[in-house]
Amino acid sequence: MNVQFYQSIDDTLLTRTAVVARKNNQWVFCKSEETYGVPSGPRAPKESILDAASRTLKEKIGPSDFTLIPVCAYSIEKKDSTAYGMLYFAKIESFDCDRENITLLDQLPNVWAEPHVQIPIIEKVRHTGLMRLAG
């Protein structure tokens, strides 16, 4: 698998979202068994990509107050296909409730759900300077 980033892309190609989230200088991750990942998910038919990112974030980690900032488009190339998505940064102010499937960490974890996808996505956001907004 290969991850590529784009400054612009035709909106009709965007089928997914990924959201790198921070709250009070901590990383916010979805936890599945013993692995971590950024909230991500598919775009529903006729849904704007921003609405898809907001819905995905709410469904995966449940923030009640947050700001979404677009970073760039991305693609994940597999053997037979390429999926395009939009990468966002989220500054989270508060959560609706406690959820067992989310983890707040001071440092990046060592065990990823999909390291070949998660690490490049996080590095892309780290290089934008947006994380200073979540201090």
Image (tube, grey):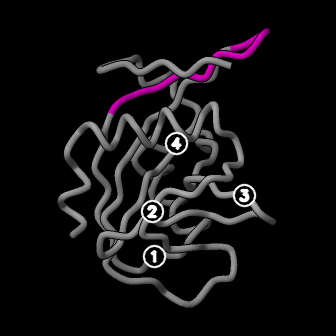
Ranked by sequence position, the earlier of labels 1 and 2 is 1
Distance from the alpha carbon under mark 1 to that under mark 2? 20 Å
Residue 17: mark in rendering: 4
Front label number (1 vs 3): 3
**Would residue 84 appear left or right of 8 to someone viewing this image?**
right
Residue occupied by mark 1:
63
Residue occupied by mark 2:
107
Element at badge 2?
loop
Distance from the alpha carbon under mark 4 to that under mark 3? 19 Å
Ranked by sequence position, the earlier of labels 4 and 2 is 4
Pointer 2 local density, CA inside 10 Å: few below 14, some 14–19, many at least 20: few
Residue stretch rendered in magenta on the structure: 72-81
The amino acid marked with disc number 1 is Pro
Quadrant placement of the N terminus: top right
Residue occupied by mark 3:
35
Ranked by sequence position, the earlier of labels 4 and 3 is 4
The amino acid marked with disc number 3 is Thr
Front label number (4 vs 2): 2
The correct choice, above or below, for 93 with respect to 66 in the image is below
Extreme-bottom residue of the structure: 97
Distance from the alpha carbon under mark 1 to that under mark 4? 16 Å
